[in-house]
Amino acid sequence: MLEKEKKCIGIIFGGESNEHYVSISSAKTVFKAFISKTNIDRFRVKAFYINKHGVWLDNDQSLKLLKENNRNETADKYQGLPKAEINFLNKIEFQSVDIWFPLLHGLNGEDGAIHGLLKFTQKPLVGGGILGSALGMDKILMKKIFSHLEIPQVNYLAIQNHDLSDDNLKNNLSVEILEKLKLPVFVKPANSGSSLGISKAKTKSEIIKALQKAWEIDSRIVIEEGLNVRELECGIIGNLKLTASEIGEVSYLTDWYDYDSKYSIDNQIIIPADINSQISKQIKDIAIRSCRALNIYGFARVDFFLEKISNKIFLNEINTIPGFTSKSMFPMLWNASGLNIDQLVAKLVDISSDL
């Protein structure tokens, strides 16, 4: 196949969010899959790295970063501050890109911002649209929709746009939380990923500290009751028809599934999870139903809690740009479902081409 006949995939990665380095790792995995023996005759890659200050790097610099084995040192060389006047469109050549593959986790990625920008290029992209991405990222809006649809969730409270620099307000909110929810509770920024900014709180003083920690990331906060649960996850791909992967379980040594444990080598991943067929079917059905409710398509990972004492299923959240790192559950779920990473990225491109 001639070079010009190959589909040009535009990988966008990095970004200003607190998941910057996770995004780099995901992009490296996807890049290797596109240039593998399986895919090299079908695809070529253009890369666009966005540094921590929002500066876009050109294809040559971005590809150099993707080809480096060291995760941080090369990226750190490109953290220059933006100039007083900067227009990335002056330097970014995107005309040859056939299909975009955004891998920006968190801010400006999963929230739909990058999808809105790329829409102006009039090129298809891998993943969902603006609405589904925004709703999937925002835990408060997501939970309100699921409550209306009676999709099972743990009990929660939402705190929106309060000035939590006020100690009296934090104290009053902690009292309200103690009155309405059972301890322990999890305090989460409404818009964040990889468990960043999340705390488990067992006392009033811990709740106050957790509120402050979450507020430093987002002015909108979710507080959830903490149950004794198993962590189960399901992958979704498709557009008009959504398909669910095998169900996976993460078994971890820490008290809860925090950032460090998500990327720990000590986790035990069990795929398929040791659950009965009825629970597996319920999880897959809820995963597809919840994605449909938020207009999420392309690909996503849907996370669940399975309460140990009751075997009740609770939907936790939907990740519209799940990780593709070597420790990420999404590619492992699909590998267990019959699609290795090379086949998976090609399948996602084919899905986006059909929209």
Image (cartoon, rainbow, N blue to C red):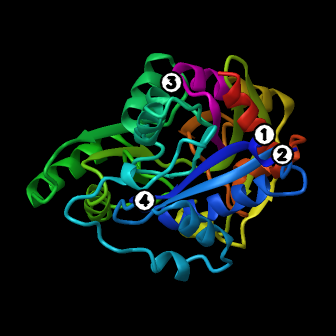
Labels 3 and 2: the sequence-earlier one: 2
202 shown above or below 238: below
Residue 273: in magenta span: no
Q: Quadrant of the C terminus?
A: top right
The residue that disc 2 covers is: 2
Q: Position of residue 15 (x, y in %)?
A: 44, 58
Tell me the residue at 43%/37% (across/down): 112
Q: Magenta segment range?
A: 286-307
Q: CA distance from mark 3 to mark 2?
A: 40 Å
Tell me the residue at 9%/57% (across/down): 166
Task: Left or right? Give the position of 264 relative to 139.
Answer: right
The residue that disc 3 covers is: 294
Q: Which mark is residue 5?
A: 1
Three-letter residue code for mark 1: Glu
Labels 4 and 1: the sequence-earlier one: 1
Q: Position of residue 161 (x, y in %)?
A: 19, 43
Residue 295: in magenta span: yes
